[in-house]
Amino acid sequence: MNTWMRNPKLLRWRNGVLLVLTLSTFIIIYNMKIPTTLRWIERLRDVPDSCPSSISEQSITPLGNTKHFLVSAYMDQRVKGFDIRIIGIFKRDSIEPLYCSFCCEGVFNKTTPATILINRAHFGFPFGATYVLCKIPESCDASHVTVLTQPFTKNVSDPIWLPIRNKQSDKLKERKLNFTVCISTLFGNYNNVLQVAQSLEMYRLLGVNRVVIYNTSCGPELERLLQSYSQEGFVEMVPWPIDRFLNPSSGWLFSEHGGDLHYFGQIVTLNECVYRSMERSHYVLLNDIDEIIMPYKHDNLISLMNMLEPQHSNVGEFLIENHVFPKKHFDPSGRFHLPQWEKVPGSNILEHIYREEPDRKTYPPQKMIIQPRLVEQTSVHKVLKNFGQQYYMPPALCHAIHVRTTQRESLKLEDLHEDKRLWHFQEKLIPNVDKVLKRAGLIN
Ligand SMILES: *[C@@H]1O[C@H](CO)[C@@H](O)[C@H](O)[C@H]1NC(C)=O
Ligand SMILES: *[C@@H]1O[C@H](CO)[C@@H](O)[C@H](O)[C@H]1NC(C)=O
Ligand SMILES: *[C@@H]1O[C@H](CO)[C@@H](O)[C@H](O)[C@H]1NC(C)=O
Ligand SMILES: *[C@@H]1O[C@H](CO)[C@@H](O)[C@H](O)[C@H]1NC(C)=O
């Protein structure tokens, strides 16, 4: 019985361990100093663990005890009384009082009440793009934020923290970009590879530095192309698995299309992209992946905007007319029906040279170039809250080229305008497209 107690070797070993433990406890407590120790004890008593314990790695994070989702958090001090803007997807009929809690240098700090604003471009769907605005407690250098359903209490169970982006310290870190294109959502089995490669290479020739794409899903060849672009760094893929959380609509109007959320969350991703780009990109282009915002009097967007900037530095929103080039009409010469692209899925935009005049009597289908620092809330075709002015770009100066199915069935070929603007870039565009298709293993 208790043989080990009589074993002097084991006894000596146990005493040694005890001595080391006691000594190290002393050293730790001595080095921590008394106030810190007291704070630790206090924290153990009535505050959860130090923070941030669990940080969200996802672009869509369910908000505990609610029907809502959080997307990302940004420093934004442009609206008086607020420091933080969290972008979310909220169930519009279930808005309850909410509180922000901050992680200040590793300490779970007190909460401040949240102000909830719903973007009015919800098109009747039950869920909508939402902004949660909060103030940071005084003298708190916040690194992370979380949203709670109650003011700070002892029983908050392991909250999920969002990193706060666009902080002063982030502003200097990244390379300054002139133009970023935001592509709101990619979904279904979209596999229009040739048109996407041509559009992306056109953007590059026009001076675009970054293309942000929110990806729910895409077709197999497009997947290879985008993987290759994102490895190179020109394209930034943001995972957007919205279909895992909601029943997203592939239409834009609830009464017609049903579902939980407008067009795979397009309003959420567009706004997310505006805030993501705010501190790193001078201009942001909000257009679809099959649209090219094309200057007609300048060789690229840089010289176009450099020309406009002196008189229009306060413009937050440049509205660009969208012009459809119907897919059903081809250039009769076949000059750019190139053999190497024969087997690549998708439309060849160089073959579509007939432009429909937009029907300006109905809703103007414009897209935008914005200065993100002057924009607070956006929809698809216009900005909803702007700190700056609005400017209608004269179509002769710049408009969007949109190769797609016709929007005006009644127009005949004779009613369309011949427009070979894209051909102006063919000498560089064709080899660049060949190069990226080769790199992705889509042509030999
Ligand atoms: C919140 O942070 C401030 C500044 O760091 C600190 O003085 C205060 O004690 C913190 N409050 C709590 C509850 O941790
Ligand atoms: C926290 O405690 C309060 C009061 O005891 C209770 O009403 C509330 O439901 C609890 N909240 C959570 C998240 O457990
Ligand atoms: C941005 O545009 C300027 C000309 O206005 C050019 O000198 C600079 O290289 C461009 N920056 C990038 C990152 O392309
Ligand atoms: C797009 O999302 C799908 C679904 O999550 C994923 O399988 C695919 O790899 C993503 N593609 C890219 C290029 O990021």
Image (cartoon, grey):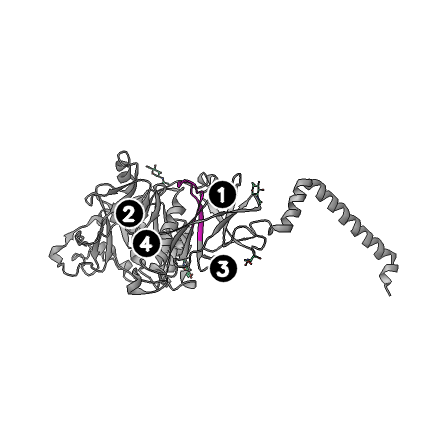
Density class for disc 2 (Cα within 10 Å; few <14, some 14-19, many ≥20) is: many
Label 3 Cα neighbours within 10 Å, binned few <14 / some 14-19 / many ≥20: few
Tag 1 near tag 3, CB within 8 Å? no
Which segment is the magenta one? 71-86
Label disc, if present, on residue 136 of the rendered structure: 1
Label 3 CB-ligand 2 distance < 8 A:
yes
- For mark 4, what is the residue? 121
Q: Is residue 82 magenta?
A: yes
**Helix, strand or loop under label 1:** loop
Quarter-of-image position of residue 335: bottom left
Secondary structure, mark 2, is strand
Please identify the quadrant where the C terminus is shown: bottom left
Work out how far the residue at label 2 is from the one at label 4, CA to CA, in angstroms. Answer: 16 Å
Tell me the CA gap for discs 2 and 3.
38 Å
User: Mark 2 or mark 1, which has the lower sequence index?
Assistant: 1
Determine whether label 2 and label 1 are within 8 Å by CB: no
